[in-house]
Amino acid sequence: MNEWLSACAALASLAALGRWARAVPTRAWGEEAGTPRTRRAALAAVLATLALQVTAAAMAAGPAAAAALVPAAWMVLGWGLTLAMNQWPQGSLRWARRLGDAGLLGCALGIGAALLAH
């Protein structure tokens, strides 16, 4: 269960990275950027995702592991998403959001299961 919850916590970063990539100007999308309202919504999604990730990772492996896992997942998966968006902008963003949403759902289910077990 702990490995599954840790993997979900790592995957969840793709949900926020995908939303942020759509809200700011990137080379993959051209100079087009989201509105300030879109950027605020993306920032709120990033903060909510971080809170969920840290909670899930801390429940799975403790606070020290959460302090290492979450930034590492953001760096590694963000790097991978950037590379993929330069080659396949539409498909990579679509799959990043799907995998990220699956990670968010896994985090929520894992946290709920852990709370019900106690």
Image (tube, rainbow, N blue to C red):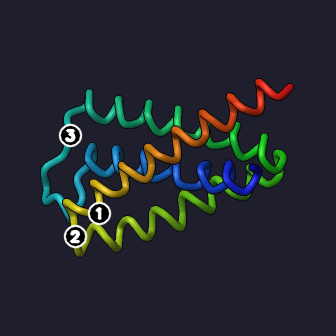
Which picture quadrant has residue 30?
bottom left
Is disc 2 placed on a helix, strand or loop?
loop
Q: What's the residue at 53%, 54% (across, down)?
A: 11
Q: Which residue is mark 1?
A: 92
Look at 37% across and 56% down and name the residue there: 96
For label 2, the residue is 88
Question: Label 3, on which residue?
Answer: 34
Q: In terms of secondary structure, where does tag 3 sit? A: loop
Quadrant of the image containing the C terminus: top right
Image height of 23 relative to 6, above or below = above
Between the C-alphas of marks 2 and 3, the distance is 20 Å
Q: Amino acid at mark 1?
A: Ser
Of callouts 2 and 3, the N-terminal one: 3
Q: Residue at x 82, y 28 (%)?
A: 117
Residue in the image at 23% along x and 52% along y: 25
Nearer-N-terminus badge (3/1): 3
Whether tag 1 and tag 2 are in contact, CB under 8 A, the answer is yes
Of residues 72 and 7, the one nearer the viewer is 7
**Mark seen at residue 118:** none
**Observer-nearest residue: 21 or 108?**
108
3 in relation to 117, above or below: below
Q: Position of residue 8 (x, y in %)?
A: 59, 50
